[in-house]
């Protein structure tokens, strides 16, 4: 988490973009402004992280969210 906070701080200070690839959706929520969901190498959904992670429009995105331990009670909206 310390490294992620440092990246966010550097990004704000120097105004740069970065590509962040992760399977951890809570990290994606914290670090990313926009998200793309890929299935078998193809983008199936993209948009603002908050929108995709709280209201997914593609079935695969919903499956990913449902696979989080503790679902459906798990919330990505702290």
Image (cartoon, helix red, strand yellow):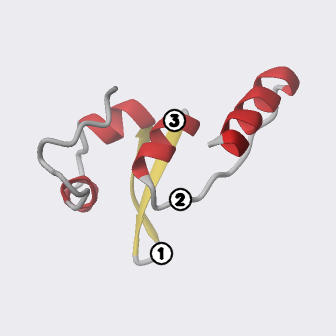
Q: Are marks 2 and 1 in contact (CB under 8 Å)?
A: no
Residue 30, numbered circle: 3
Q: Position of residue 23 (x, y in %)?
A: 46, 61
- What is the CA distance from the residue labelled 1 to the residue labelled 3? 24 Å
- Residue that lies at the very extreme toward the bottom in this rendered image: 40
Quarter of the image for residue 42 reads bottom left
Residue 41, numbered circle: 1
Quarter of the image for residue 4 reads top right
Q: Secondary structure at mark 1?
A: loop
**Label 1: few (<14), some (14–19) or many (≥20) C-alpha neighbours in 10 Å:** few
Residue 22, numbered circle: 2
4 relative to 14 in the view: left or right: left
Q: Residue at x 34, y 26 (%)?
A: 78
Q: Position of residue 52 (x, y in %)?
A: 34, 40
Q: Along the line of sight, which residue is nearer the eye, 18 or 3?
A: 3
Q: Nearer the viewer, mark 1 or mark 3?
A: 3
37 relative to 67 in the view: left or right: right
- What is the CA distance from the residue labelled 2 to the residue labelled 3? 12 Å
Is residue 32 something that shows in the picture?
A: no
Q: Residue at x 76, y 27 (%)?
A: 9
Q: Residue at x 51, y 35 (%)?
A: 30
Q: Are marks 1 and 3 in contact (CB under 8 Å)?
A: no
Q: Quadrant of the N terminus?
A: top right
Q: Along the line of sight, which residue is nearer the eye, 72 or 53?
A: 72
- Residue that lies at the very extreme toward the left in this rendered image: 72
Q: Nearer the viewer, mark 2 or mark 1?
A: 2
């Amino acid at each position: 988490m310390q490294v992620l906070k440092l990246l966010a701080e550097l990004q704000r200070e120097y105004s740069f973009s970065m590509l962040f690839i992760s399977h951890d959706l809570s990290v994606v929520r914290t670090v990313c402004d926009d998200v793309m969901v890929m299935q078998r190498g193809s983008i199936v959904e993209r948009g603002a992280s908050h929108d995709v992670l709280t209201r997914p429009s593609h079935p695969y995105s919903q499956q990913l969210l449902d696979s989080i331990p503790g679902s459906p009670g798990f919330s990505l909206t702290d």
